[in-house]
Amino acid sequence: MDKAKNYHMSPDEFRKYGKEIIDWIADYYENVEKYPVLSQVNPNDIKKQLPETPPAESESFDQIIADVNNIVMPGITHWQSPNFYAYFPSNSSGPSVLGDLLSSGLGVQGMLWSTSPACTELETQVMDWLSQMLQLPEKFKSSSTGGGVIQDTASSAALSAVLAAREQKTNYLTNDKGCTGKLTAYISTQTHSSVEKAIKIAGIGKENLRLIGVDENLAMKPEALEKAISEDLSAGLTPFFVCASVGSTSTNAMDPLIPIGEISRKYKLWMHIDAAMSGTAAICPEYRHFLNGVEYADSFSFNPHKWMFTNFDCNCFFVADRSALIKTLSILPEYLKNKATESGAVFDYRDWHIQLGRRFRSLKLWFVIRHYGVNGLQYHIREHIRMAQEFAEWVKSSDDFYLVAPAPLNLVCFRHKGNDEFNKNLLETINKTGKMFFSHTVINGQYVMRMCIGQTNTQPKHVIEAWKTIQETAEELLNQDK
């Protein structure tokens, strides 16, 4: 091999191309709303432009960036567009991207305290900050019996909670002997599908998952929950887990935490709260009431990568009793043993979740909190909610559209007075233009449009334009049918 060429990118090259990438991202954020929000490519359009075989020789960075622009970008759905209203947001921000870049540059693998003490201790402190910001009970802080850990998604958090609940209920025998088939878990009909997946992965079985009915606000009925638990006990089964939602995915429904918590405590069930997007709202004191009852919970999670300007992935998972979680997930082979772990004076976060390896995610969260400050975060959360509430009022005042579900925060579920086919055609027609992107759900058998306002750079002018486009497109479709 030519000694002058070792194939690595030199520090000077990294400086040069790194600055180009930063400029590229900055330009992208400046111009993102000019792109079609929903990618306009057809299936396999991207793949057909990629070579069948990998390059044998090094290619220039200029070539790579050219292919990003010409091949990759047309296939991007722009989640960072201010006109992205679909699903729940997955928003980002400058400080978050820079924190993530620093994390990538350091290349830390923080599985143990000893493998990078700063990775662990910064995470512990940032999670304690968030506990304060959300006014969580003291038991969720590292200085008490519990603590917080950063996971990738709410799905992993739910699985960790289910596993800990399973082991606690069976006195930690299930890890050794396997499931008996008698454990039962409870969610509402509106709970995110990730909990059902967790139940399957944990070996509980879908047949042992009870779907509890909801009220007119699509929130879990506590009396139906207690009835299901009583029936399972009478049948010789062992209830062990319930998940309550603070902001369900379809409609942002708020389950009644206090009565669910009281029932959980009465029957000794592990109570997990999934507040994936809406938990962020509790940073504002006036929305903290949505977490009333969190004191009953054994675990709680929310996603800063949804509505707290921290790029994907970043889930914050809190437990009231970390010993139950650690006892469930800890395995210590010889190659991981070290003095710090054996001293018991440190957290080894690899015992707090499924995977062994872990990235330095707390850096980007730390950057975001320090850049915005609590006041800055509150400002943007309030502004998103204000815009959504104003949009909801426009819908209420309309002769052609109406709300289908309550809009407690930043999600508005609505539809045109026409039939399902018309509403589906309306949504798809708007999305095809590329100007904005909405998603849908089905509520009580009706096709419903969802408008979630939570993208970092969405401003009132974007929401005004969205409502105008919705109305004008509906009128055009109606005229076509005449």
Image (tube, grey):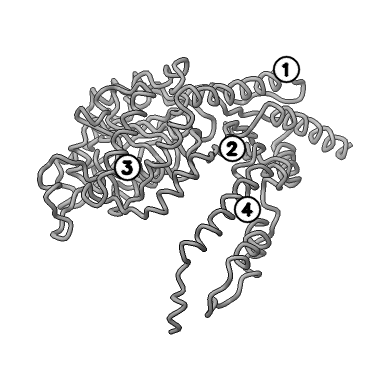
Mark 2 secondary-structure assignment: strand
Q: Quick check: 177 left or right of 51? A: left
**SS at badge 1:** helix
Which of the 4 image quarters holds residue 157? top left
**Residue at figure coordinates x 60%, y 74% from the top left:** 51
How packed mark 2 is, by other alpha carbons closer than 10 Å (few <14, some 14-19, many 20 or more), is some
Question: On the image, numbered disc 2 is attached to which residue?
Answer: 441
Of callouts 4 and 1, which one flags the residue occurring earlier in the amino acid sequence? 4
Q: Measure how far apart labels 3 and 1 are at the Cα level.
A: 45 Å
For residue 76, the mark is: 4
Q: How many angstroms separate mark 1 from mark 2 (CA)?
A: 22 Å
44 or 378: nearer the viewer: 378
Q: CA distance from mark 4 to mark 1?
A: 36 Å
Which residue in the rendered view is the most extreme toward the bottom? 1
- Amino acid type at image mark 2: Thr
The amino acid sitting under disc 1 is Ser
Q: Give the SS element for disc 4.
A: loop
